[in-house]
Structures are given as structure tokens and as C-alpha cells.
Image (spheres, rainbow, N blue to C red):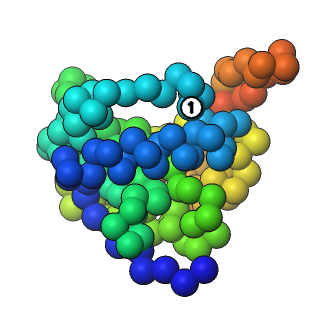
Amino acid sequence: MENNITIRQAVVTDVVDIIRHKRIVLQENASFMGRTAKEYQPTVEEELARIRRHQTETGLMLVAVNREEVVGMLTFSRPQRPHYSHNGMFGMSIQERFTNQRLGYKLLNELLMFAKNDEAIKKISLEVYAHNERAISLYKRLGFIVEGRKPYHRKESDGSYVEDVLMSKILT
């Protein structure tokens, strides 16, 4: 697929497109997400508040935009408590039609550059479901290591359970 994707920080005018993007991803990849599309019912005001929180010094929200449409995003948050503010957690989503085009790599690379330019950030962490092999492979290629696992973390509608994998990268 030929596209011209730009990665940039999210701004408040992206709010409607971000909501649309999240709904698409929740429908396409429900088994990889922590909530269902039915559970995701934000108001514009709630999502605006989320964007604004990530625009502070303790966070980052990136969007991947193709022809003025948000098709991927990454959010990174750091605790404000001094003993924990050196590390942060990120989450990422990409619409299926834009996967396998190095978009996840590009979003993560932007996060890593952001973190390296902030001397206070020493560790980046994430949680990913064990069956999301595509994402785990990307994280490992970028130097993230498995720190632990949470067995029986998510219960599926069929009664089966999904394991959560904890990964991180220490910045040196």
C-alpha cells in the first residue's frame, strides 16, 4: 500500500479522529486489547483531557497520520511521584491496513528518541498479551526484554485465559 504517513505529537484538534481510530482498532484486534469496542465510549471532553494530560512534561502522545487520518498512535505516561518518575509505560495501536509497514517501529523509535532527550527517563515499560507475537517480536528487536508474566490475566468470553507479558528497556 502506497502511503505518506507522518508521525507527530497529538493535538486537541485530533480528538475526533483519535476516537475513530481507537474504535477501529478495538474492532479489528479485540483479542489484543484490554477493553472491547463496546466498553470504549468516551465523550469528546474525556478524550480531550487525555490528550492534554499527555502534552504535559510527564507524557507523550504520538499519532501516525495518513492523508489527515489517524491510523496509528502511541501513548507514554510517567508517574509524577518522584521515586517512580524515571520510568514510564507505553501503549500502541495501529490499524490493520497499516501493519507490516514499519509503522510500529517508527512510532517506537520516536518514543525512544523522546526518552533519550529527557535525562530523567531511565526505563520504558509495556504490557502485551502473550499471543500478540507480532508486537513482542518488534519489542525484542528494539531491545526490550521480558521482565515477567501475569498468568490468567485476562478472561475471554469462552472461559479461556490470556497471559500478560511485562517487558521493558533500560536506557543507558
Measured from the top left, where is residue 125 in percent x and y?
46, 41
Quadrant where the N terminus is found in the figure: bottom right
Measured from the top left, where is residue 59 in percent x and y?
25, 42
Front residue of 172/146: it is 146
Q: Quadrant of residue 102?
A: bottom right
**Which residue corresponds to mark 1?**
37
Categorize mark 1 by other alpha carbons within 10 Å: few (<14), some (14-19), many (20+): some
Q: Taking the image as drawn, is residue 62 in sight?
A: yes
Front residue of 64/129: it is 64
The residue type indicated by label 1 comes to Ala
| 7, above or below 39, in the image | below
For the point 66% across and 44% down, which residue is it? 29
Front residue of 79/41: it is 41
For the point 19% across and 47% down, which residue is it? 12
Measured from the top left, where is residue 93 in percent x and y?
51, 50
Q: Quadrant of residue 32?
A: top right
Q: How many marks?
A: 1
For the point 33% across and 55% down, which residue is it? 62
For the point 51% across and 40% down, which residue is it? 23
Measured from the top left, where is residue 68 in percent x and y?
34, 67
| 38, above or below 30, in the image | above
Mark 1 falls on what kind of element?
loop
| 69, above or below 49, in the image | below
Q: Quadrant of residue 19?
A: top left
- Please give left or right for residue 2 compared with residue 76 in the image: right
Q: Taking the image as drawn, is residue 167 in sight?
A: no
- Please give left or right for residue 23 compared with residue 32 in the image: left
Front residue of 128/18: it is 18
- Please give left or right for residue 65 compared with residue 34 in the image: left
